Amino acid sequence: MAKKIAVIVGSLRKESYNRKIANELIRLADGKLDLQIVEIGNLSLYNEDSDQNPPQEWTDFRQQIKDSDGILIVSPEYNRTIPGALKNAIDVGSRPYGSSVWPGKPGAVITSSVSSLGGLAANHHIRQAFVFVDVPLMQQPEAYIGNSAKIFKEDGKTVVPDTEKFLQNFVDAFQKWVEKF
Ligand code: FNR
């Protein structure tokens, strides 16, 4: 059976390029990995005071991560770092202390940006947080997708052949990475 992967999109924007890239990864995984987007836009801001009586959406999110065999982050860069919504989701999953849902789940990170830098800084900041929450991340291939507004075909959904090849290689490598665990 295909391993179930929680895909977390760092942008909440309806027409998000990152969400479109995530949807392309779902298509290209072709059932070899069961990629499912886990929504983070409904998570209220993490506050330690609520650890004893957590809001339902935190509990649901934590359960969705617990039920997955791996984590795939597809995210933009905001002000040279991790978008707040994504960082909040990482924090929510990491607590209460001693009950983090992250440790040991194999992961991978893709960042994309409308600029040519491809969200490089955010990519490495996500990696930094994932070191601490003990998510073993695929090292290679790295994925910094620049000029994200220009990688889609006229349908606005599917990516141009060069990007498709790149994403296919990434998802195939991630499948191999997940299978090692
Ligand atoms: C951005 N953007 C951006 N791009 C970048 O390469 N480096 C950056 O530091 C930032 N900072 C930033 C901050 C904020 C608040 C916004 C809204 C945007 C531009 C960003 O790459 C662009 O908006 C992407 O299209 C966002 O991804 P989605 O929403 O299309 O997935």
Image (tube, grey):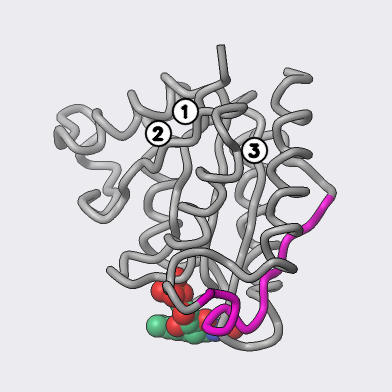
Q: Position of residue 79 (x, y in %)?
A: 52, 83
Disc nearer the start of the sequence (2/3): 2
Amino acid at the residue labelled 3: Gly
Nearest the camera: 17 or 130? 17
Amino acid at the residue labelled 1: Ser
One can see residue 79 in this view = no
What is the span of residues highlighted in magenta in the rendered image?
141-153
Nearest the camera: 119 or 53? 119
Left or right: where 34 falls relative to 132: left
Answer whether residue 138 is magenta in the image.
Answer: no
Residue pictured at 66% horizontal, 44% vertical: 108
Amino acid at the residue labelled 2: Arg
Q: Tell me the SS state at disc 2.
A: loop
Q: Tell me the SS state at disc 3.
A: strand
Residue wearing tag 2: 95
Mark 2 surroundings: few (<14), some (14-19) or many (≥20) residues within 10 A? some
Residue wearing tag 1: 100
Mark 3 surroundings: few (<14), some (14-19) or many (≥20) residues within 10 A? many
Residue pictured at 56% horizontal, 43% vertical: 72
Residue wearing tag 3: 107
Residue pictured at 63% horizontal, 58% vertical: 110
Asked if labels 1 and 2 touch by Cβ distance under 8 angstroms, the answer is yes
One can see residue 66 in this view = yes
For marks 1 and 3, give the one nearer the viewer.
3
Left or right: where 85 falls relative to 154: left
Cα separation, mark 2 vs mark 1, equals 5 Å
Disc nearer the start of the sequence (1/3): 1
- Image: 129 above or below 121: above
Cα separation, mark 2 vs mark 3, equals 19 Å
